[in-house]
Amino acid sequence: MRSVIQRHAPLLRQLAQGARTHRTGPTRPVAPRRPNPPARTLIAGGTSAFSSSPASASSSPTGATGAMEVYQFPCLQDNYSFLLHDPSTGATAVVDTPEVAPIEAALKEKGWKLTHILNTHHHWDHTGGNAELKARHGCEVIGPRGETKGEIPGADRAVGEGDEVSVGNIVAKVLDTPGHTAGHIVYHFPTERKVFVGDTLFAMGCGRLFEGTASQMWTSVQKITSMPPETSVYCAH
């Protein structure tokens, strides 16, 4: 993971000296949907770059409990979503809801019941399925409390830096990572050595600065790079 960040460090530093992006948010895709790309799990390991792995339950890094199962699958044109499952309780969360049909298909394939939605930020390609999934499953919707330019549809609980979110018996710590949006958050599962970063990090960079500053994004990225080197990083794009 660190080599990817280092490769982009000069650009981020240049942006931090004053450059800003003034776009208001991602535009909806207008091109016909292309076939789903192979799913990837982006692994952070020492100074190695991101590597790919199948879209099945991920193997646990050294030192992790291995309690949480993760299932990754593509949505829309270039998004990924993730099911997080606690076998001991049956609780299952989805990280962001780009598109309902692939999420429902993944739940059916795994035989899991959706109990939580964990949103990282307000953009439509991360919250578009909230209302329908909540209506179907009665799941709890959890999202960032710091968003200023958009709401989290169906939100039941707003969280931020220092809060904890439980998926069954497995606990995530919430970190504020503004930059892409004003209130963007990530969900870090320390015992599982996994972090779900939404649009703070991409496979080959970071999210555009729609609402925050480059300085904020740099600080946010550093929160992730300071995690243990065995931490698996799950990006949304």
Image (cartoon, rainbow, N blue to C red):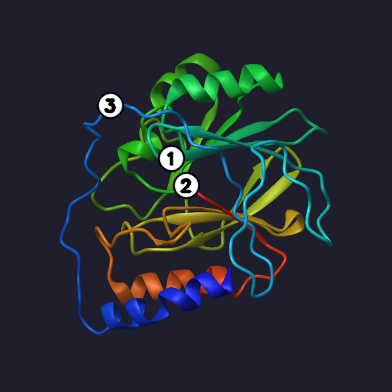
Residue 221: x %, y % from top left? 47, 70
How many marks overall?
Answer: 3
Q: Which residue is mark 2?
A: 236
Mark with earlier residue (1, 3): 3
Is residue 11 toward the left or the right of residue 59 in the image? Answer: left
Residue matched to label 1: 79
Which of the pair 107/169 is nearer the observer? 107
Going from N to C along the chain, the mark reached first, 2 or 3, is 3
Please name the amino acid that badge 1 sits on: Asn
Q: In the rendered image, which quarter is residue 9 located in?
A: bottom left
Judged from the image, the secondary structure of the residue bearing numbered disc 1 is strand
Q: Residues within 10 Å of mark 2 (few under 14, many from 20)?
A: many
Residue at left 81%, top 56%? 64
Residue 39 seen from this side: yes
Categorize mark 1 by other alpha carbons within 10 Å: few (<14), some (14-19), many (20+).
many
**Quarter of the image that includes the N terminus:** bottom right
Which disc, if any, is residue 71? none
Examine the rendered structure and indicate whether residue 37 appears above or below residue 9: above
Question: Can you see residue 138?
Answer: no
Nearer to the camera, 221 or 131: 221
Q: Which mark is residue 32?
A: 3
Q: Position of residue 128 (x, y in %)?
A: 36, 30
Which callout, 2 or 3, points to the residue nearer the camera? 3
Is 13 on the left or on the right of 115, as rendered?
left
